[in-house]
Image (cartoon, rainbow, N blue to C red):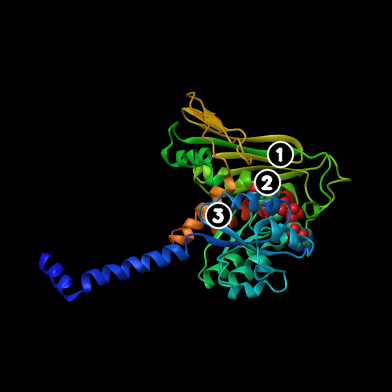
Amino acid sequence: MQKRREFLKKSGLFLGGLGIVTHYAFTLHSKKKKLGVCLVGLGNYSSTILAPALQRTEHCLLTGIVTGSPEKIPVWQERYDIPDKNVYNYQNMDSIADNPDIDVIYIVLPTGLHAEYAIKAANTGKHVWCEKPMAKTAKECLAIIEACTKNKVKLSIGYRMQHEPNTQQVIQWARTKPFGDIKKVKAEVGFNIVNPPNNWRMDAELGGGLLYDVGVYAINAMRYTTGMEPISVKGHHENSRPEVYKEVPETSIFEIDFSNGIKANGQTTASRSINILQADCEKGWYRLQPFQSYRGVKGEASDGMLLDTYIENQQARQMDDDALAILKDTPVLVPGEDGMKDIVVVEAINESARTGKPVRLS
Ligand code: NAD
């Protein structure tokens, strides 16, 4: 080794080599320190949550926007210092391919449009973040995954709960089983929506309805709490306001059997406020209540342990985690396959509601 060093020193390769390595590492680091993120769809979630959260990230910068609403452009440009060359519409967003300011395209559109635009995004060669629910059908989800694989870009689904520390404790307990085997899981999320919005959330074609919008949180929670996959799904819909909920269900109730005998009960509704995830185990229980909210996710266990770690901003953490997976080329926390498995269950709940029979999943 000593001889090798001396040889390198004498030949000048030692310092020179180090110099090259240092310079290379510095260029790579400085170039890729923060990823440029382009938001597609400047609706409520983008404008009130994601854009402000991006300002609080360590590894992301809001560098671009895609919008079909010209009146929003000057407001966003001024607020977030976005140059003209980084402003796109739905027709010309393909040319993001040539924009070095943008590393990630984040799809924040109505659910029924996720597949079309996530595939467009993947074809630009940029990494793709796609809001939950991933898409309307499992077939669409698969098409998104295939487009990302073909273009060799990373795909993350915006399930922010999996980035939240109390939820991560529950996810870990699926493996470590501190209260013995899990026997039963309950995951319910609902809101007392007196005046439903008059928009795509009430439109079946665009992927509206509570089951898609927040039911996927309950399904995702059942899967991460058990660490298992569903084998059988039974579901039905209820509607106390047929004059309002004309196209999409007001309430969906579902029972899911998991592979090792665990039974899970779920519910999602627009008629009352509920927000609970509970696991009943051989020797105790634990719950998060609320388990799905922007702030204040907290819980407790039957032995008195509190699950009350606080984080300031879930979405900033989610986007930083996803950015680091790109920067370090490591697996993302919530890949497309995870988003797709929930949509398989949503489709099974709808099929069971239609036929009155349980749907077996392979
Ligand atoms: P929104 O209605 O406020 O915004 C939707 C945006 O899409 C608008 O800017 C609208 O102009 C645009 N749009 C483009 N084409 C459209 C069309 N054909 N019809 C209707 N709108 C069209 O919705 P949102 O609350 O911002 O939700 C957007 C996405 O974000 C959804 O997938 C939703 O599930 C998801 N979301 C996720 C969270 C979360 O906590 N992860 C929270 C809210 C919303």
Q: Indicate the secondary structure of the residue bearing disc 2.
A: helix
Residue visible at 50% across and 70% down in the picture: 152
User: Please, what is the three-letter code of the amino acid marked with disc 1?
Assistant: Gly
Q: Are marks 1 and 3 in contact (CB under 8 Å)?
A: no
Q: Are marks 2 and 1 in contact (CB under 8 Å)?
A: yes
Q: Which mark is residue 338?
A: 3
Image height check: is 59 above or below 121?
Answer: above
Which of the 4 quarters of the picture holds residue 39? bottom right
Residue corresponding to mark 1: 190
Query: Disc 3 versus disc 2: distance between alpha carbons?
Result: 15 Å
> Picture coordinates of residue 238 (x, y %)?
78, 42
Image height check: is 326 above or below 243?
Answer: below
Residue corresponding to mark 2: 214
Image height check: is 7 above or below 330?
Answer: below
Image height check: is 94 above or below 251?
Answer: below
User: Please, what is the three-letter code of the amino acid marked with disc 3?
Assistant: Asp
The quadrant the C terminus occupies is: bottom right
Q: Indicate the secondary structure of the residue bearing disc 1.
A: strand
Residue visible at 57% across and 49% down in the picture: 56
Q: Is residue 15 left or right of residue 163?
A: left
User: Please, what is the three-letter code of the amino acid marked with disc 2?
Assistant: Val
Query: Disc 1 versus disc 3: distance between alpha carbons?
Result: 22 Å
Label 3 or label 2, whichever comes before in sequence order = 2
Label 1 or label 3, whichever comes before in sequence order = 1
